[in-house]
Amino acid sequence: MANILTAIQVIIKHYSNSLSNDTDSSNRVNAMGEGLEQFIKDSFANSFYESKSEKIKLYSSIFSYLGSQNHIPDMMLRSGDAVEVKKNESRSGSLALNSSYPKAYLDKNYPKLKQECRDCEIWDKKDLLYVIGTVTKKTKILNQLWMLYGDCFAADHSLYEELLTDVSKSISDTLDDLVSETGEISRLNEVDPLKITNLRVRGMWEIRNPSTIFNYLEDIDLSYPHFQMYCLMQKEKYNSMPEDDRYSLENLKSSDNFFIKDVRIQNPNNPAKLMDSVLIVFREKQ
């Protein structure tokens, strides 16, 4: 069954075979926009060299849902994790989450899910894997990839929901005569003398880059000149992965450019507490 550990092995093999320099653009590890999502799908499906028709078959067997634009998630592994893909142009730049606040996990009852996502398989709650690719603006080459689970950095959803409620209430208490019903944070109607202008108040969320969030981990190196990949998950999640997949990953040739390490990270709900976690690092050889 496809999972984060099998995808990591596919990516490592991809780079170890120097496919990033392949002259066939369909096989190059270059990504921008939809290209990054395509790269991630091919990593889970191990389909980099397959024809389009074969990719479609593999995707159908691996994924239960392939998302639509502007709706979380971008994909869901059949009987596995939900995956949200983000790209930026800086290894340390903040990430725009748009109208979706950061999530420790994906709940079926989250109101912004598409109905097709709710109905794609029988599920109630899925671990949410965030995949953040840094794509160089000029070359459009993927030079850094973060794969980490939401429960490593996102607080409980109630914190974000309560904040939204507080902001909406504050606006209503101050400008009650202008406020009308809305599915957004707030809506103020007829705000000008001619009563022709409305103000829609919408949430646009932003979060720091994982390279910044976890800069206290000694193995984070933003100066490395070539492609690098970081994967972070709680130890409990790692141990829940199929034993064969853990064994095959752990028995890849260990070297300076690939290693698996136990680390402790701050609890998103209480930074005074530390969580046992696993950090996986791969760097393309110079």
Image: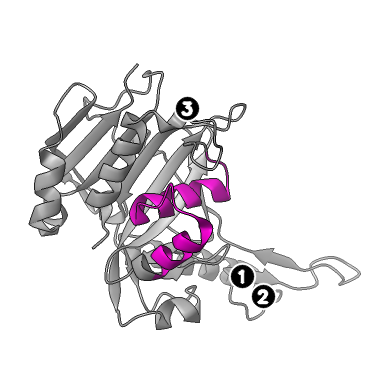
For the point 35% across and 32% down, the residue is 15
| Label 2–label 1 contact, CB within 8 A | yes
The magenta region covers 31-60
Residue 131 visible in the shown view = yes
SS label for mark 1? strand
For the point 13% across and 35% down, the residue is 261
Q: Where is residue 6 in the image (x, y as percent from the top left)?
A: 25, 51
Residue tagged 1: 186
Q: Where is residue 52 in the image (x, y as percent from the top left)?
A: 52, 58
Frontmost of labels 2 and 1 is 1
For the point 15% across and 35% down, the residue is 252
Residue tagged 2: 179
Q: Position of residue 51 (x, y in %)?
A: 49, 55
- Where 143 sits versus 245, above or below? above
Question: What amino acid type should be assigned to the residue bearing mark 1?
Answer: Ser
Residue tagged 3: 21
- Mark on residue 258? none
Q: Residue 77 in magenta? A: no
Frontmost of labels 3 and 1 is 3
- Mark 2 or 1 closer to N-term? 2
Q: Where is residue 282 in the image (x, y as percent from the top left)?
A: 27, 31
Who is closer to the viewer here, 226 or 48? 48
- Mark 2 or 3 closer to N-term? 3
Frontmost of labels 2 and 3 is 3
SS label for mark 3? helix
Q: Residues within 10 Å of mark 2 (few under 14, many from 20)?
A: many
- Where 24 sits versus 150, above or below? above
Question: What amino acid type should be assigned to the residue bearing mark 3?
Answer: Asn
- The quadrant in which residue 187 appears is bottom right
